[in-house]
Amino acid sequence: MRCRKIFFAAIISLFLLVSFGFGEEYSLQYFLAKGSSKANELSKKEKMELLNQIEEVLGQATQIHTKLIQNIQTGEMDIRYQEGKFWISKMEEDKDSIETGIQQIKLLKDKPTHLVPSIKLYKSLKDLSSNFNAYNNIPSFSALVGDLAPEMELWADPVFYKLYLLPLAQLKDKEVKKETPQQEKKPTPKAKKP
């Protein structure tokens, strides 16, 4: 009987250890905590997971974007014609930002040390979060947009900027400084006045 209890306790503790080892979740809270700590260097796995999480957010943005356009075009939302045209044009900009963001994520997954795609992704995220926050201020849109706008803003600014873009830019800056050695300035002889 005693052996069974020890055996079952060992199995339960083994399952707990296995679940803690494999159950590492990379959520927004994880990356926010990582960004607020002093050691904010991301491992390669964490960088890929960050890009995957941002890709999911862009996927949600695509779904919301599609629903917003459908609701405006079908007349489900009570919006005047001119306002509808304005918001549709804004949403076309969003479509371009979403597509650009997804393209840049694909580039960064292949080559994570490229600075230009990371800057373009950051700009896309900032533009989208700004527009989605504007949509959130319109009562008929806010039901569809919900919490995605502030979440997208958090993914863009403190998380992606601080954990991915800024360290990458600092790394590139160090590489440029190493490649271009500073030349010594030779003193120029002063001309004597006669």
Image: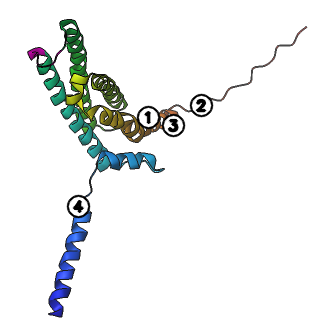
Inter-mark Cα distance, 1 to 2: 20 Å
Q: Which mark is residue 114?
A: none
The x, y position of residue 158, in whole percent, is 40, 38
- The quadrant of the image that shows the N terminus is bottom left
Q: Is residue 51 above or below residue 121?
A: below
The three-letter amino acid code for the residue at tag 3 is: Lys
Q: Main secondary structure of the magenta part?
A: loop
Which label lies toward us, 1 or 2?
A: 1
The x, y position of residue 43, in whole percent, is 35, 50
Residue linked to disc 1: 169
Inter-mark Cα distance, 4 to 1: 32 Å
Q: Which mark is residue 182?
A: 2
The three-letter amino acid code for the residue at tag 1 is: Ala
- Residue 105 is drawn in which quadrant? top left
Q: Which residues are magenta?
A: 73-78
Q: Which mark is residue 178?
A: 3
Which label lies toward us, 1 or 3?
A: 1
The three-letter amino acid code for the residue at tag 2 is: Gln
Residue linked to disc 4: 22
Secondary structure beneath dot 2 equals: loop
